[in-house]
Amino acid sequence: QYGVRTKAGKQAASFRLSVMAPPKITNSVDGITYKSMYGSSNLIGAAFDYEWRPLRHYGTFGIQIGTGFWTAQGSGRFKDSSRTDKPQGKLSLFMIPLNLFAIYRFDYSRKQWLVPFIKGGGTLYGLAELNDDYSHNNFAHSEAFGGGGGFMLSLGRMNSTSAYTLAREYGVADMWVTLEARGMVSPEKNVDFTGELVELGITVDY
């Protein structure tokens, strides 16, 4: 009987689980690699983004800044390469990115419940390698550039009651399940983050 009043989202926030290919890190002095210390398994972490959406005509254009977190555990190596035993000490590697991306959503209608998007930009990765007794800690950084895209599935547009509840009770314009894939290329070859990552999570427009 009555129209459903919703709001137009000018900002967005996202939380996603992230799976990233391991970086290619090589010690230029002794040739020890990331793989030899931490293995070759993909890294599982979390990503957080804030999006400012200044243009909302003919689709939606936004600027996205964000960060995240990945970690890996491994064992060190002796300086004497002839030793075959492994050190007892453990190492923890923490990777924290700082992202800056431009994002365009192919979002043309309030009734459109599936919205593709593309994005491009760069990431500055900060790395901290900590010994279990904190006696020998190492820090580094690297850059990577690239982009990708994905799909957003609306949890409100498919149901008018849900859209009304989100807008009136929580001040939320839209809530989405987001799937994203990106490819990145790093100009730094000793700390090389060239590779792919896939992220799945929730995006809230408000």
Image (spheres, rainbow, N blue to C red):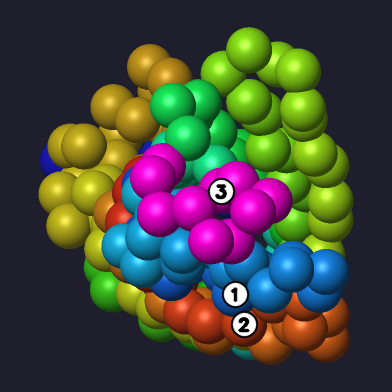
Height in image: 36 above or below 116?
above
Residue 28 in the magenta stretch? The answer is: no
Mark closer to the observer (2, 3): 3
Q: Decide: few, some or many residues near mark 1? Use Cα within 10 Å; few <14, some 14-19, many ≥20.
A: some
Q: Looking at the image, tell me whether mark 2 or mark 1 is earlier in sequence order.
A: 1
Q: Residue 39 location in percent, x, y? A: 37, 60
Per the image, the residue denoted by label 3 is 77
Please state which amino acid type lies under the numbered disc 2. Answer: Thr
Residue positioned 78% across, 48% down in the render = 126
Height in image: 23 above or below 97?
below
Per the image, the residue denoted by label 2 is 194
Height in image: 22 above or below 156?
below
The residue nearer to you, when weighing 49 against 6, is: 49
Please state which amino acid type lies under the numbered disc 3. Answer: Arg
> Magenta part of the protein: which range?
77-86
Per the image, the residue denoted by label 1 is 24
- Label 3 SS: loop
- Label 2 SS: loop
Q: Looking at the image, tell me whether mark 2 or mark 3 is earlier in sequence order.
A: 3
- Label 1 SS: strand
Tell me where residue 129 sits by quadrant. Answer: top right
Relative to 159, is 20 on the left or the right?
Answer: right
| Residue 69 shows up from this direction | no
Residue positioned 56% across, 48% down in the render = 77
Asked if disc 2 and disc 1 are in contact, CB closer than 8 Å, the reply is yes
Q: Decide: few, some or many residues near mark 3? Use Cα within 10 Å; few <14, some 14-19, many ≥20.
A: some
Residue positioned 83% across, 86% down in the render = 187
